[in-house]
Image (cartoon, helix red, strand yellow):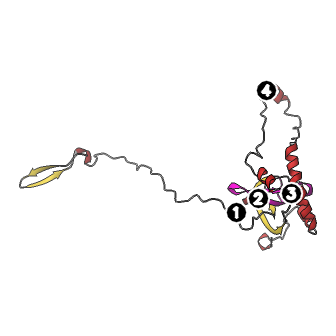
């Protein structure tokens, strides 16, 4: 920046700013858009106090909505690892969003479950499916009317399911009526008031 120059006008002197510091003769008619300041802070996800391992949950969305499942572990980003068990209500080992579950006051003892196996299942790469993309050609065109082939469950996934469910079912059978409670689906009827229910 250049220093202002001093000029004499009659008996007085005054400083004249440099041409670069002078006010612009023309200015844009529209104001320049300034980005808004985001005041939200990113906080790490913390599970609700009711979402403890062993708690019986009611699924509210997805393929198994209405089913009662057992919570095995809290994962990252608000995801929960649950199981039916599969032999009781047909819900396999799967991940669900914590926003779409209701935690009940019923708890199942998780004693005897292999913690190393639960850690292996809760890994990020365990549930990534190998999707074989079919090429869009003549074969794909003629297969449109046919029934889709049933997905085969891998033997390792089935073995993990049995290993987890074996100890879990043994603990469930120790409690009277717990197996039948898990096998029944949750539903609301006319006149039911969910806000007054004690979960």
> In the rendered structure, which disc, 3 or 4, sits on the residue that comes first in sequence?
3
Spatial distance from mark 3 to mark 1, Cα to Cα? 21 Å
Q: Residues within 10 Å of mark 1 (few under 14, many from 20)?
A: some
Q: Residues within 10 Å of mark 2 (few under 14, many from 20)?
A: some
* Residue underneath mark 3: 84
Q: Is residue 88 left or right of residue 130?
A: right
**Label for residue 47?**
1
Place residue 153 in its image quadrant.
Answer: top right
Spatial distance from mark 2 to mark 4, Cα to Cα? 44 Å
> In the rendered structure, which disc, 2 or 4, sits on the residue that comes first in sequence?
2
Question: Residue 109: image x %, image y %?
Answer: 85, 65
Task: Let me know if residue 83 is in the magenta part.
Answer: yes
Q: Tell me: residue 166, above or below residue 27.
A: below
> In the rendered structure, which disc, 1 or 2, sits on the residue that comes first in sequence?
1
Question: Residue 158: image x %, image y %?
Answer: 88, 47
At a point 86% along the width and 51% down the height, the residue shown is 161
* Residue underneath mark 2: 73
In the image, 64 versus 127, the foreground residue is: 127
Q: Secondary structure at mark 4?
A: loop
Q: Tell me: residue 55, above or below residue 144.
A: below
Foreground: disc 2 or disc 4? 2
* Residue underneath mark 4: 137
Q: Residues within 10 Å of mark 4 (few under 14, many from 20)?
A: few
**What residue span does the magenta drawing correspond to?**
63-88
Spatial distance from mark 4 to mark 1, Cα to Cα? 47 Å
Spatial distance from mark 3 to mark 2, Cα to Cα? 14 Å
Foreground: disc 1 or disc 2? 2
Task: Let me know if residue 66 is in the magenta part.
Answer: yes
Q: Secondary structure at mark 2?
A: strand
At a point 52% along the width and 57% down the height, the residue shown is 38
Q: Secondary structure at mark 3?
A: loop
């Amino acid at each position: 920046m250049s220093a202002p120059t001093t000029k004499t006008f009659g008996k007085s002197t005054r400083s004249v700013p440099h041409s670069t510091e002078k006010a612009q003769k023309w200015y844009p008619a529209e104001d320049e858009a300034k980005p808004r300041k985001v005041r939200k802070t990113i906080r790490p996800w913390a599970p609700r106090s009711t979402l403890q391992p062993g708690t019986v949950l009611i699924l509210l969305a997805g393929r198994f909505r209405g089913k009662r499942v057992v919570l095995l572990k809290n994962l990252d980003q608000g995801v929960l690892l649950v199981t039916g068990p599969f032999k009781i209500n047909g819900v396999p080992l799967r991940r669900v969003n914590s926003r779409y579950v209701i935690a009940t006051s019923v708890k199942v003892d998780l004693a005897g479950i292999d913690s190393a196996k639960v850690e292996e299942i809760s890994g990020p790469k365990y549930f990534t499916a190998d999707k074989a993309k079919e090429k869009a050609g003549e074969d794909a065109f003629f297969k449109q009317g046919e029934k889709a082939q049933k997905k085969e469950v891998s033997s390792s996934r089935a073995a993990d399911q049995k290993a987890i469910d074996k100890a879990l079912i043994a603990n469930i059978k120790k409690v009277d009526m717990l197996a039948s409670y898990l096998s029944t689906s949750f539903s609301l009827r006319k006149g039911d008031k969910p806000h007054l229910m004690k979960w």
